[in-house]
Image (cartoon, rainbow, N blue to C red):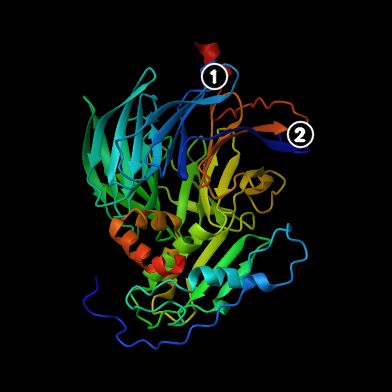
Amino acid sequence: MNFEDEDFELREIQKLEGHTDKVWSVAWKPATGINGIPAVFASCSGDKTVRIWEENSTGSFQCQAVLEETHTRTVRSCAWSPSGKFLATASFDATTAIWENVGVDFECVSTLEGHDNEVKSVSWNNSGSLLATCGRDKSVWIWEVLPGNEFDCVSVLQGHTQDVKMVQWNPSMDTLFSCSYDNTIKVWVENGDSDDWHCIQTLGESNSGHTSTVWSLTFNASGDKIVSCSDDLTIKVWTSKMQEWDQNAPWKHVCTLSGYHDRTIFSVHWSREGIIASGAADDAICLFVENNDNEVEGTTFKLLLKKEKAHEMDVNSVQWNSGDRRLLASASDDGTVKIWELVRLSGQKLLFQVADEVFDESAEQACA
Amino acid sequence: MVSELINANPVVYEKKERRDRGSRAVLDEYAAEPIDQLEIFDHIRDIKDPEHPYSLEELKVITEDAVDVDDQRSYVRVTFTPTVEHCSMATVIGLCLRVKLMRSLPSRYKVDIRVAPGSHATEAAVNKQLNDKERVAAALENPNLVDMVDECLAPSYA
């Protein structure tokens, strides 16, 4: 898609109030906001609750459910299973709760215990058969999803020397990524089908990596690029030639984006068509796109726009909806969630053409 | 709480006299008054040391000059000096400073807390921990730690 010679605006659509403490994380329910299905997302907070928000027919969001009285401390992050049937929530109370979504109701069907203390992040793999969690106890746990809402811990991965801030599965294969207060990103793969997981690569300072806590990482749609963000005030892009048959292909540093945020960057998220959003403790949100002008230096990214004072306090999480409209949700210490839409300054809505190699809807329909 | 004191004999200094901030000439009583160094210092000077019955000011853990403030940018940095280099109470002191400023300043403020360069054996580790807001949030859900912090903060509200 073409971002040249166009002025864009991140327009605030709605400010959602309800949480009574800082909002740590937001997660869009998969396959919502598309084909007439209303967009749905979850937010979680220091108030120990999770809220489910749904778009109504006029396009504004309302709180549809409050998931409470299960976690006894901060709910740090949440993640939907790929089918959207389950929501996993990770809490400082040392547990991860699994909620089953039936209609408008959410029932806690399982509680995963095992971490010594605060659980900080949870992620489902692409097929929904595995779950990963991580926390202050420096470990990463892999859980197998069994019938009857059973979750079996198949592996506990030690390797980080400090608390693990986030885990994230690669969207195209079962390779797990974790990032930590120890300034590194680790890549984990399974040995055959043995439940024996091990670290195949550590991306640290010696690989042009981060020099302080790595708070978050996400993938582009095809899974061959990572973007990570850090307390070192930079955003880094990584790439690999990884393929189905070679999960061990090394990841390499591509470029570093610095000078855009002047306090800790807590969240990055890559949209389906390639726009990187970042949220930071400077209360701002930035958007970046790949810069095609620069053939000499290889892949670089340029700032599409910076939204100063996006929130009144730190921005903890930014997440793109992958549906029809370019909606971005952001969560903040100010206790609110905001919904933004990326629009042209002319006010014209952006209907994106998704890159062919990523997802060609029209082709798929033609075949069907 | 602590069976053996980390610094058994701290040097105790005299408190500075409190200056009356209100005595400054008021040109426009409705004008927003910027937050200044002394105001911040007043919020934190009476915080009690976690292991002694003295204030952070009396132990010279903080001084007025240790406060950098830029009201325009809503930014404060407090640099404190632990009484001994291996002070394991440094993170508790830092947490007290952070909590007091969190409660006292407008929410637009960004606060950095750090130990004075060269004043602590594990300076970088202490600074990193004090400025990791997730760790701070988790610490403030720990009832024992909150009790300890509240006890230290009590005199500062007097």
The amino acid type of the residue labelled 2 equals Leu
Residue B109 spot, x, y in % from top left: 58, 58
User: Mark 2 sits on what residue?
Assistant: A345
Could you tell whether B118 is left or right of A276 in the image? left
Could you tell whether B93 is left or right of A321 in the image? left
Residue A158, placed above or below residue B48: above
Residue A188, placed above or below residue A210: above
Q: Which mark is residue B113?
A: none
User: Mark 1 sits on what residue?
Assistant: A56
Residue A169, placed above or below residue A100: below
The amino acid type of the residue labelled 1 equals Asn
Given residues B76 and B24, the one toward you in this image is B24
Given residues A138 and A280, the one toward you in this image is A280
Q: Earlier in the sequence, mark 2 or mark 1?
A: 1
Q: CA distance from mark 2 to mark 1?
A: 25 Å
Residue in the image at 54% along x and 62% along y? B111
